[in-house]
Amino acid sequence: MDIRQLRYFLAVANEGQVTSAAKSLNMEQPPLSRQLKLLEQELGVTLFDRSGKRLRLTPTGELLRLRAAALLQQFNETITEVKEQDEGIQGVLSIGAVVSCISLLPQRIKIFREQYPRVTFKVQEGDHFLLGEQLEQRTIELIVTRLPFEASSELQRYSVLQLPSDPFVAILPSQWSPPMSQLTLTMRELAQYPFLTLKTDQTTGMHAKVVNEFRQNGLEPQILCECSSVAIILAFVAAGIGATILPKSVMASFPLNNMRMYDITNAEFQSDVGIVWLQDRYLSKTAKRFIDTF
């Protein structure tokens, strides 16, 4: 059994079909089928249940899938580490970011590129759960996110670098706005308006923080709509549908067309921000240097 056979096995295990696995591996189907048979013969076990339309892993096959994925990950990380030792800082750095933290990236990427011009970037946007899965699969190395990080894995698996907290601000449609001379709003004033909050089925931290702040002031927000993205919320605000509260840094990425922004008085809540990566996985030299910029 060698690394090549483990790659073939994992491709079929993930696809559930030899045909689509062969296509993903850029090879013909018959040689792939032969390699699977040879692997089963060498180990003396049955790895796949072939009775249905799709190949299903046997319990033995599932055990090999888990072990093979870990071995291949370690193999790939070893190659990366060896190359970096000789080549220095270069290659592609894959970063995940929640949309409310995108504004933290442009200046840092610009400065980083000036220091390390041979590095290019791949940036993936998503919610905590999507980015957490991609971190586990190693399609990204680190995440710029709001804290706490709400993901499916145990929190002890993550290393977190906490960044300076971000104040919340109120965003209102221009046509609802108080006089131009007024620069702040209280939570009581905000409670008059129909409200839009940031919440998905899996990530609720931002929504809970805003609602709790109203309740600590003895108020109940008139929640009109729970939205899955900042872009949706701000489009609705601009259209005059409702008001919202968001971290101030978010607004650096969005024009205030048909909207006005206000600081909030008598409120003590902040949005915590951080960089998250896996504790138990190899972190590339490039990723370490990028984290240093924060």
Image (tube, rainbow, N blue to C red):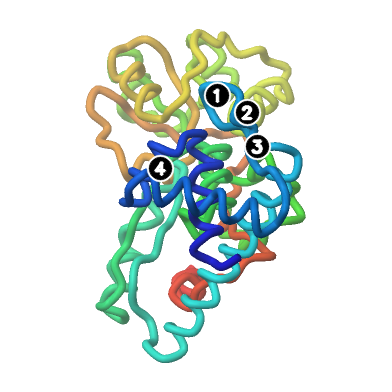
Q: Secondary structure at mark 1?
A: loop
Q: Nearer the viewer, residue 31 or 182?
A: 31
Q: Which amino acid, by three-letter code, is at mark 3? A: Leu
Percent x, y for residue 10? 54, 49
Q: CA distance from mark 2 to mark 4?
A: 17 Å
Please indicate, yes or no, whether residue 210 appears anywhere in the rendered image.
no
- Cβ–Cβ under 8 Å for marks 2 and 3: no
Q: Which residue is mark 3?
A: 57
Q: Judging from the image, what secondary structure is the residue with disc 4 in?
A: strand
User: Mark 3 or mark 4: which comes first in sequence?
Assistant: 3
Please tell me which residue is depicted at 59% across the width and 30% down the height of the picture.
50
Q: Which residue is mark 4?
A: 125
Q: Residue at x 55, y 24 (%)?
A: 199
- Residue that badge 2 annotates: 204
Tag 3's secondary structure?
strand
Front-most of residues 93 and 271: 93
Question: What is the CA distance from the residue labelled 3 to the residue labelled 1?
Answer: 33 Å
Q: Earlier in the sequence, mark 3 or mark 1?
A: 3
**Residue 245: x and y, percent?**
49, 28
Of marks 1 and 4, which one's residue comes earlier in the chain? Answer: 4
Q: Residues within 10 Å of mark 4 (few under 14, many from 20)?
A: some
- SS state under label 2: loop
